[in-house]
Image (cartoon, helix red, strand yellow):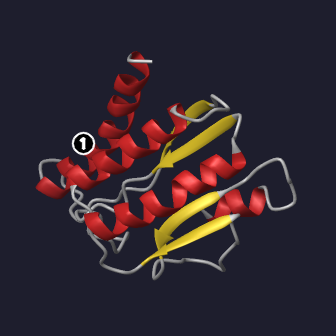
Amino acid sequence: GNGSARIFAADGRVKTYSQHCEGNLFSAREASDLDVDVPVGEGDDGYLALLGEHLPRFLEATQPDLVFFQGGVDPHQADRIGRLELSTAGLKKRNALVYRLVSGLQSAPRLVVTLGGGYPRNLEPSSPPFHQVVQSHMDVYRQCAAAHARL
């Protein structure tokens, strides 16, 4: 996102990829090496098509030694500020694609997964939106552990 793009803007060793809702910028946009705008309200199919089109080429071109995946779940339809409409299944497909692409790179990079956005529409812990967002956060890490257990 904006923070990574700004921090590493002058460091040619670091390449940044950002896929984000085009209508969800809270500050001046910082340019990543590749910014992929996702239309407001986009769901699983459109989001995953964009990811499948752009991320493989970006990773192949850069052949990183280290990949940071900021696995935010703010694209989830139960999120109150993300402005996208991904389902839990869609986010799981995103995670799986990222893990598969990174593990298949010739450069054999290390992968670091960090917590990202995810803000339930309802902050009551017993509410379905709260449960969906928290579970989606957990899925990011569960899927990473499962993917790397097979390697």
Taking the spot 57% from the left edge, 62% from the top edge, the residue there is 18
Image vertical order of residue 58 relative to residue 142, above or below = below
Q: In screen coordinates, is 11 left or right of 29?
A: right
Q: Quadrant of the N terminus?
A: bottom right
Q: Quadrant of residue 46?
A: bottom left
Image vertical order of residue 27 relative to residue 15, above or below = below
Taking the spot 53% from the left edge, 44% from the top edge, the residue there is 69
Q: In screen coordinates, is 18 left or right of 136?
A: right
Number of dots carrying numbers? 1
Q: Nearer the viewer, residue 54 or 27?
A: 54
Q: Nearer the viewer, residue 134 or 95?
A: 95
Q: In screen coordinates, is 128 left or right of 28?
A: left
Taking the spot 53% from the left edge, 52% from the top edge, the residue there is 56
Residue designated by label 1: 135
Amino acid identity at mark 1: Gln
Q: Quadrant of the C terminus?
A: top left
x, y percentage for residue 67? 62, 40
Image vertical order of residue 22 relative to residue 119, above or below = below
Q: Secondary structure at mark 1?
A: helix
x, y percentage for residue 4? 68, 56
x, y percentage for residue 81? 36, 71
Q: In screen coordinates, is 2 left or right of 122?
A: right
x, y percentage for residue 20? 48, 68
Q: Residues within 10 Å of mark 1 (few under 14, many from 20)?
A: few
